[in-house]
Amino acid sequence: MSNWFCDTEHPENEAKRPFLKEIFKVARMEERYKTGEIGKLDLSWTERHFSL
């Protein structure tokens, strides 16, 4: 996936990196919840706040 971020024909891909990191972080937390590794009271904080 690092090649996707370094694509010279699409430099806007690099700006999407923080969003994708947060999406994957939430997806990992969701998977951990589904497998019972974490409970309902565990919180997942995102690192950044984005305005769209």
Image (cartoon, rainbow, N blue to C red):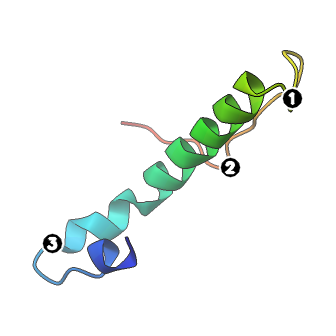
Q: Please name the residue that numbered disc 3 is placed on.
A: 10
Q: Is residue 46 above or below residue 35?
A: below
Residue 3 horizontal/vertical position (percent): 31, 80
Residue at the front extreme of this rendering: 35
Residue at the top extreme of this rendering: 40
First in sequence: mark 3 vs mark 1: 3
Residue 33 horizontal/vertical position (percent): 76, 26
Count residues near mark 2 (Cα–Cα under 10 Å), then give few for <14, some for 14-19, many for 20+. few
Q: Please name the residue that numbered disc 2 is placed on.
A: 47
Q: Secondary structure at mark 1?
A: loop
Task: Please tell me which residue is depicted at 43% across the width and 38% down the height of the picture.
Answer: 51
Q: Secondary structure at mark 2?
A: loop
Locate the C terminus by quadrant: top left
Task: Please tell me which residue is depicted at 43% across the width and 62% down the height of the picture.
Answer: 17
Q: CA distance from mark 2 to mark 1?
A: 20 Å
Task: Please tell me which residue is depicted at 61% across the width and 48% down the height of the picture.
Answer: 48
First in sequence: mark 3 vs mark 2: 3
Task: Please tell me which residue is depicted at 75% across the width and 38% down the height of the picture.
Answer: 45
Q: Is residue 30 above or below residue 10?
A: above
Q: Please name the residue that numbered disc 1 is placed on.
A: 38
Q: What amino acid type is highlighted by mark number 1?
A: Ile
Q: CA distance from mark 3 to mark 1?
A: 38 Å
Count residues near mark 1 (Cα–Cα under 10 Å), then give few for <14, some for 14-19, many for 20+. some
Q: What amino acid type is highlighted by mark number 2?
A: Glu
